[in-house]
Image: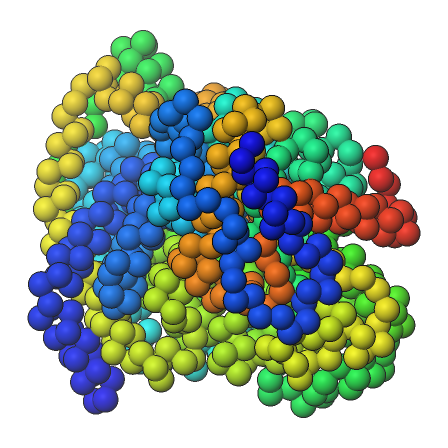
Amino acid sequence: MKLKKYLASIGTVAVSMALSSNIAFAACATDGLPASMDGPDGYPERALTMIVPYGPAGGSGQVAQAMAQAVSDHTGISINRDHKPGGSGTVGMTAFMATPADGYTVLEHIDDASSAHALDSSRPNPATDLIPLVTSQITFSQIYIRAKEDRFTDWPSFVEWVKAQGGKATIANVSKEGSMERVMMKFITDATGMEIQQISFDKGAPRYGALAGGQVDALFEQPGDVRKFLDAGTFKPILTMLKEAPAAFADVPSLTDAGLDFDPLFRFRGFYVHKDAPADRVEWLQWAFQKAYCEDSYQKYNESKFMTLIESFRDTAGSQELITNTISQYRDVYKQMGLEVK
Amino acid sequence: METFNNFLGGAVTLFSDPLGIVIFFGGVIGGMLFGAIPGVSMLTLAAILLPFTAHLSPEHGIMLFSVIYCTGVYGGAITAILFNIPGSPENAPTAFDGYPMTKNGQAGKAVGAAVMCSAIGGTVSAVIMMIATAPIANWAISAFGPPEIFALVFFGLAVASSVGAKTFWKGWLSILIGLLIAVIGLDPVGGIPRWDFNMPYLLAGIHFIPTILGFFAVTEIFVQAENRAKGSYQAPKLSVDFPSFAELIAHKFAVLRSIVIGFFCGILPGIGATLASFMGYNEAVRWSKDKSEFGKGKLEGVISSETANNAATGAAMIPLLALGLPGGALTAMMVGVFQMHDMEPGPLVFLNSADLVWVVFAAMFFANISILFVGYLETKTIINLLRIPFQFLAPMILCLATVGAYAVRGLTIDVIVMFVAGAIGFFLRRSGYSVAGIVLGLILGRIGEQTFAQAMQMLHFEWSGFAGRPIAAALLVAGFLTLLGSIYGAFFKKQV
């Protein structure tokens, strides 16, 4: 139980998303953990399996690969990634729940698991039906326009232009029922009084191509996913969905700057194990995954994805709190939206 | 001239580096092998290799993936032709006529055509890629949005209605069955579950690879087993004769047409080689004077499909390199290789890493050329597998197909789907329905439904909006005319 003491000592790492504002994360959040830890009774004596409910090329596939590599580098234990895409993460979650709770299988999942549970409580609750090992990526969303756009150039002129179109303006996002994107767009349209047609693209490339090619007027996305377009000067952010703008986007209005009064939702990715897995193995996995977060290779990966602009790390308790709050927030919104919450 | 000099520079860099040569030929052979094994595609190889590319230079890493892409798309043609098992979905149309050619004793000719046309399609595509990457990429994403892609799919389905079926009506019913299967799972835009029967695995839909394996490989084994039981089984006649030069020249328009189609499909983000091969095949059928010959072993079917899918490879690199938009899963993994080296594909790559770009261009060019030589050797050896007696070959194929179906997502339901599709295909084939049509409906149905929903959102749910987009309107009109022509033929020429 030594680990619990260490975890308690570092505390729950800043739960509030107010951490977003201009904080430099010089020290890694798990520096207080022991550098090495023996597994209980020789565990793990073989490679671990990581179920990834999305394909290898997307954001989940990439973070799974980076984390698996970091865990292997730190512990010497191999992790085989098993991609089971489909059903917005449902297939992977179902496959994971059917595996033995022996600590040899872990799951990567995103906030979709939380929103799915919020909509239908028969779906697993990641905070209580699973044990979060670590949340390793938390990011915010932005609205982008083409850099060469001349019909509008910033958030105020964009809102004015959209209102003048009488509902004909378009924005590309992933607007599946109950998705974070759709909920956030509801917040925005309610707060501004503008009406905008959401075009749902489930894959990144066609979504970004739609904005670059002028098929849509704007794009809803997270900055790490469009970093290359930002670096190349193709896309321009006009709204950051945080209460306060991070330093990297100091010139882009935040929700507060834009006069939008709502609590933003976040995209987060993390790693889980069965709640019935042996406690001593869970403890070792918590140590391995949280230490891996601080590996140089993983930190470099997170940095390349703009995942260090706000605190991305949550330990088990922090993850549970994040998930529970998120579920509660989604439930309230779903009810307001008239969706059937089971 | 500058392009040629850049190309020469890239080629010299590639072949003056011993490690580069090893990686190049490793990619050529690895792509062909993994492309040929059903389920275990070039994507599997790429996923395995991805972490190791961190230890290679950026030039070697990107070059390896681009070479695997070129040869992997070709690799699946061999098993499609010899055993009716398309190694990858983009080789499925190759089996429509390739396998009947094997049964007719023309396996060598079919494989030879696949080798030569893959090389031609890929090489021409690579050359166009070198000449005009940036302007083509910008044109493609501006001119082709969801309405245009939906119209293209509709046109493709209208053209394909007659492929492999005994009558017009059976052809359309086959396609409609495919479209119906395509709607199983979450709807691609709103995420609403459909036809899932409360089974979580069905939320992901019916994957087309197990379906293809079932309809083609398993059905074929059932049919041959029945023939064997009846005593009417005839082993395929072995032949290693390549198509003559005159035969290829006779199909020059088919090759040219498929290059254009393949290239065009390849540059559209998210579309790629699978749609290219189906569209290439469909157009071959549409332009043919005797459509009834397709599906029975027509060389033009193999030529059209294999030219088009390899023509898509060079084209798919265009949006990736010029805009950072991957056209498919493998090019998306290439983004990962770039990122491992702190680089991002996109306009800046041409400015910051011109050397890398030209090494990749040169590697793709020579990878397509090498298909000719390595493919020729491969053909002369692999074709002898046909000598294995059916009672040994059939279980081997079934095992391979089962592994292939399971390997797609690691789900048992995919194996069940494969065997169910095999049984259904067995009965459908007897009654004159087209399993090719079902597969086409399934693959194009997914793309078509998604782009239709997106198009309607973009056009504010007004059908007349299509009229304001000339390319979409032209494709829809062409599709309707094709459909009306088919109905006219069915009613007035008694092709019912």
| Residue A275 visible from this viewpoint | yes
* Residue B496 image offset from top left, x and y in percent: 56, 37
Q: How is the image coloured?
A: rainbow
Residue shown at 85%/52% (left/top)? A333
Return the residue nearer the eye: B414 or B477.
Answer: B414
Residue at 81 percent of width and 68 percent of height = A188
Is A185 placed above or below B384 here? below
Left or right for B286, reference B36: right
Q: Is the N terminus of chain B in the top left, top right, bottom left or bottom right quadrant? A: bottom left
Comparing A221 with B26, the one in front is A221
Which percent across, then down, holds residue B20? 15, 63
Image location of residue A252, percent across then percent down = 68, 80
Residue B473 occupies which quadrant of the picture? Answer: bottom right
Q: Can residue A319 be seen in the rendering of this structure?
A: no
Q: Is residue B258 left or right of residue B104?
A: right
Q: Work out whether A207 lies above or below B496.
A: below
- Which quadrant of the view contains residue B135? bottom left
In depth, the one of B188 and B238 nearer the eye is B188
| Residue lying at 40% horizontally and 58% vertically, measured from the top left | A297
Q: How many marks?
A: 0
Q: Position of residue A133 (x, y in %)?
A: 56, 40
Which image quadrant is residue B380 in? Answer: top left
Q: Residue at x 65, y 49 (%)?
A: A11
Q: Looking at the picture, tell me which residue is in the foreground, A270 or B432.
A: A270
